[in-house]
Amino acid sequence: MDKKLLYKMFEGRATDQDITQIRKWVNENKHNRVILSNERKLFDVIQFNESKEKAVSHTKKISFRAIAASVAAAIITIFILYGVSYLVDENATTFVAYNTVTVPAGQRVELQLADGTHVWLNALSKISYPVSFNGKKREVFLKGEALFDVAKEKNKKFIVHAGHCDVEVLGTLFNVEAYKDNEFSTALMRGSVKVTDNRNPDKYVLLKPNNLVNLTNGKLVVSQITDLNPYTWKDGLITFKNISLRDLMKKIERNYGLTIVIENSKWDHYACSGKFRVSDGIEEILKALQQDAHFTYERENGNEIHIR
């Protein structure tokens, strides 16, 4: 197989005839699939390095940018788990290369998809998306939390598969949170989206701007967004209003890659509000909360904090 043809596909310039030729070659044996995977990884490394050197990440189909300005690109390459997979359908009519980006605790990442869609990934999140959107739909797969600013393509719907639910849009700005299959929410800031419970395809809701839908007891429940501050996480902020200390600690765990154990049940009903920058650090945040809550805490084993 001519490697130039493979790189042509990686760049999204391959014709249907090219794809057919590559598909047949891939199906011949396992060795060819290994070669394809290795060439793809090499292509991604070259592309990423060029984007750093030229500082023109907006021109690349796959580009990463640290949300926190203090995090260098070299560090991002260490912490982000990045992979490529290839899917061939049973009828041998479709050949699709998928990128997968996994963000560990304490990190946030922005990336741009091939169609120009911007995606901000929160900590402990994973997204898989095609190298190029050649079909009739643009489909991505999410586990965790992400904010999408979808590029408009009137005749090509954008679909986010997240847990038990699918979010379908044409062009809009919305936040999806689905860290677990039975936990799902979508908040719409701009445009319109259709949210479907994929276990019951006939059950769906249409959201308008400033609407929020939650999967509650197996049902999609729509409510009004009264506070947009929680969605400022993409800017490196931890913003909260009238939430329990226990729920707040769950957010902080994701941001700092820590385990926080609340040992005193009296904090289960304590509601707090505030705003911090992730860059403030966990110690500063806990000290500030102590001013009102008057709890004590102790750090054990480096990554575990006990609140009493």
Image (cartoon, helix red, strand yellow):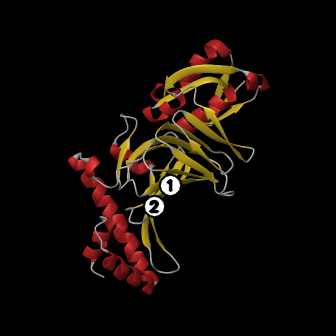
Q: Picture coordinates of residue 216 (x, y %)?
A: 71, 42
Q: Picture coordinates of residue 222 (x, y %)?
A: 64, 38
Quadrant where the N terminus is found in the figure: bottom left
Q: Residue under label 1, please give it.
A: 159
Amino acid type, residue under disc 1 in the picture: Ile
Label 2 SS:
strand
Label 2 neighbour load within 10 Å: few <14, some 14-19, many 20+: some
Earlier sequence position, callout 1 versus callout 2: 2
Residue at x 28% of width, y 47% of height? 58
Point out the residue furthest to the top here: 291
Label 1 neighbour load within 10 Å: few <14, some 14-19, many 20+: some
Query: In the displayed structure, would residue 51 be above or below residue 42?
Result: above
Report the front residue among 263 and 25.
Answer: 25
Q: Quadrant of residue 297?
A: top right
- Using residue 265 as the reference point, say whether residue 22 is left or right of it: left
Q: Residue under label 2, please give it.
A: 137
- Using residue 228 as the reference point, say whether residue 293 is left or right of it: right
Mark 1 and mark 2: span between their CA atoms? 7 Å
Residue at x 63% of width, y 29% of height? 248
Tell me, yes or no, whether the two marked residues, 1 and 2, touch with CB atoms within 8 Å.
Answer: yes
Report the front residue among 23 and 213.
Answer: 213
Residue at x 44% of width, y 43% of height? 172
Q: Quadrant of residue 256?
A: top right
